[in-house]
C-alpha cells in the first residue's frame, strides 16, 4: 500500500464511521493497523486479484467478550462493543434470519460487513469489512 492508498483508506474509514480519530498505520507493504485514538482496533490487508487487476482491502476486527452465553454470541453485547470501539452510535449489529453463524453490520442503513461467530469459542467473533478500490475513488473523499 502506498501513501496515497493509506490516506484514502483512512479518509474512507473516518467518513464511514463518522469518527475523525481513526488512523491507518502501515505495517508491511500489504497491511496496516487501524487505530481509534491510541487504541488499535483492527488490521487492514490488501487483497489483490491478479486476474482482474483489481485491488480491494479487508478490514478485520477480532472481538473477544468476557462472558459467553450457552446459546451463543449476544448480539446486544457485540453491538455495544462495536459502538464503543468506533465511538459511534451509528453502527449496529443485526442478526441474520437464515444463518446462525454470523450477523450483519450496518452504519445507519448501509450494510458494511459481516460479524462471524467462532463455533469453538462463543466469546470470540470476527468483524470483516471489505473495501473495494472504487470505494476509495469517491469524489471529495480526501477533503476534511
Image (tube, rainbow, N blue to C red):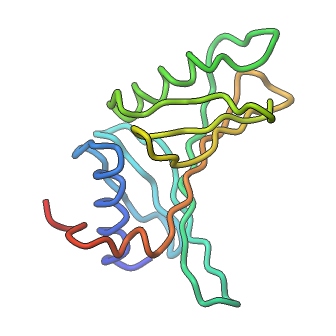
Q: Is residue 21 above or below residue 84?
A: below
Q: Is residue 67 above or below residue 143?
A: above
Q: Is residue 40 above or below residue 92?
A: below
Location of residue 36 (image quadrant): top left
On the picture, is 59 further left or further right than 64? left
The residue located at (37%, 64%) in the rendering is: 9
Residue projecting furthest to the right: 120
Taking depth in this image into account, of 48 and 37 the one nearest to the observer is: 48
Residue projecting furthest to the left: 144
* Rendering coords of residue 111 (x, y %): 52, 46
The residue located at (56%, 16%) in the rendering is: 76
Location of residue 86 (image quadrant): top left
* Rendering coords of residue 136 (x, y %): 37, 71
On the picture, is 106 further left or further right than 38? right
Taking depth in this image into account, of 20 and 98 the one nearest to the observer is: 98
* Rendering coords of residue 126 (x, y %): 65, 40
Which quadrant of the rendered structure holds the N terminus? bottom left
Which quadrant of the rendered structure holds the C terminus? bottom left
- In the rendered picture of this protein, how many numbered marks are placed on residues? 0
Q: Is residue 3 above or below residue 38?
A: below
On the picture, is 46 further left or further right than 33? right
* Rendering coords of residue 133 (x, y %): 47, 75
The residue located at (49%, 39%) in the rendering is: 106
The residue located at (57%, 60%) in the rendering is: 58
Amino acid at each position: 500500500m502506498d501513501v496515497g492508498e493509506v490516506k484514502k483508506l483512512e479518509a474512507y474509514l473516518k467518513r464511514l464511521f463518522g469518527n475523525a480519530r481513526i488512523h491507518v498505520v502501515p505495517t508491511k507493504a500489504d497491511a496496516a493497523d487501524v487505530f481509534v485514538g491510541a487504541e488499535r482496533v483492527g488490521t487492514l490487508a490488501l487483497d489483490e486479484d491478479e486476474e482482474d487487476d483489481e485491488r480491494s482491502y479487508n478490514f478485520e476486527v477480532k472481538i473477544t467478550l468476557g462472558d459467553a452465553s450457552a446459546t451463543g454470541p449476544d448480539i446486544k453485547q457485540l453491538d455495544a462493543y462495536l459502538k464503543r470501539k468506533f465511538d459511534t452510535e451509528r453502527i449496529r449489529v443485526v442478526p441474520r434470519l437464515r444463518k446462525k453463524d454470523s450477523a450483519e453490520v450496518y452504519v445507519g442503513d448501509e450494510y458494511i460487513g459481516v460479524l462471524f461467530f467462532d463455533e469453538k469459542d462463543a466469546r470470540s467473533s470476527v468483524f470483516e469489512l471489505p473495501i473495494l478500490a472504487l470505494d476509495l475513488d469517491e469524489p471529495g473523499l480526501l477533503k476534511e
